[in-house]
Amino acid sequence: MIRATARKFLPPDAGFTLVELAISIFIIALLLGSILVPLATQVEQRQISETQKTLDEIREALMGFAVANGYLPCPDRTAGAGANDGAEDVTAATGICQVLSGTIATGNLPWATLGLGNQDAWGNRFRYTVLETFARRAPATPFTIATAATTLRVCSSQACTTIITTAAVAVVVSHGNNGLGAISADTNLARPAPTSADEIENTDADLDTVSRVKSNVAASVFDDVVVWLPKFTLINRMVAAEKLP
């Protein structure tokens, strides 16, 4: 009875017991966790939206460049002399891009040539692929309405069983939040290589590019953000500007 009475009249500043303190910390941790997870999701979604907006601006800049010059820009090379400086790399004596891979030229987006920002929301360069026939200039013959060329394909998977378009003349890729396959805008060094088939497809310098919804599943990780320039959108813009035929 005496012990119970003493406890009843403890001073108000006696403090928490260890059990009460542990419970309080646990509750606070739960509350913080419920706040931080949605916050991280919101930040990533904002980064994706910012990058998509930048890609839309890049597509408009590519069309503007073609209207002004009669051809699309060449990529900025990622290795060798003049690499990663944002300027298109073209051989003046031939009028043909320097970074060729078969019928395409691929490298960094020539952001300085286009007068654009040099990185996506995650601090990486944009990858730019263009049909080399649409980037030729004098003394080579620039493209016309009648130019026949194998166009770029954009698919929903590496196997390309579902094709989004077969009529792109240029594709621009942000390698997303994980940055796999990208080149850092800060160091100009290559990030780690991708491991999933769809992200590898967007780094292998061929005619196909994958564009699909984001996935965090280990076997099919994908967070690339992609935009492309359709052939007939470009031609229509140049005809309207009286640059073609």
Image (cartoon, rainbow, N blue to C red):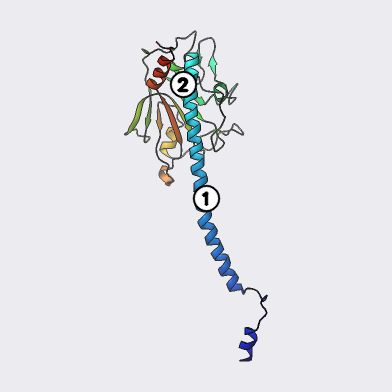
In the rendered structure, which amino acid carries the disc numbered 1?
Answer: Leu
Q: Where residue 20 appears, x then y in whole percent?
A: 58, 72
Q: Where residue 139 appears, x then y in whole percent?
A: 49, 7
Against 213, residue 32 (above or below) is: below
The residue positioned farthest toward the top in the image shown: 139
Q: Which quadrant would the C terminus be assigned to in this image?
A: top left
Frontmost residue, 10 versus 218? 10
Mark sitting on residue 1: none
Frontmost residue, 109 versus 67? 67
Residue matched to label 1: 39
Q: Label 2 near label 1: C-beta < 8 Å?
A: no
- Looking at the image, residue 82 sits to the left or right of residue 224; the answer is right
The residue positioned farthest toward the bottom in the image shown: 1
Instruction: Say few, some or many: other residues with alpha carbon within 10 Å of mark 2 (under 14 / 14 to 19 / 20 or more).
Output: many
Is residue 51 shown to the viewer in this render?
A: yes
Residue sitting at x 50%, y 57%: 34
Q: Where residue 205 appears, x then y in whole percent?
A: 45, 27
The Cα atoms of the two marked residues, 1 and 2, are separated by 37 Å
Res. 152 image quadrant: top left
Residue matched to label 2: 63
Q: Where residue 3 appears, x then y in whole percent?
A: 63, 88
In the rendered structure, which amino acid carries the disc numbered 2?
Answer: Met
Instruction: Say few, some or many: other residues with alpha carbon within 10 Å of mark 1 (under 14 / 14 to 19 / 20 or more).
Output: few
SS at badge 1: helix
Is residue 193 shown to the viewer in this render?
A: no
Against 8, residue 215 (above or below) is: above
SS at badge 2: helix
Label 1 vs 2, first from the N-terminus:
1
Q: Which quadrant would the N terminus be assigned to in this image?
A: bottom right
Number of numbered discs visible in the structure rendering: 2
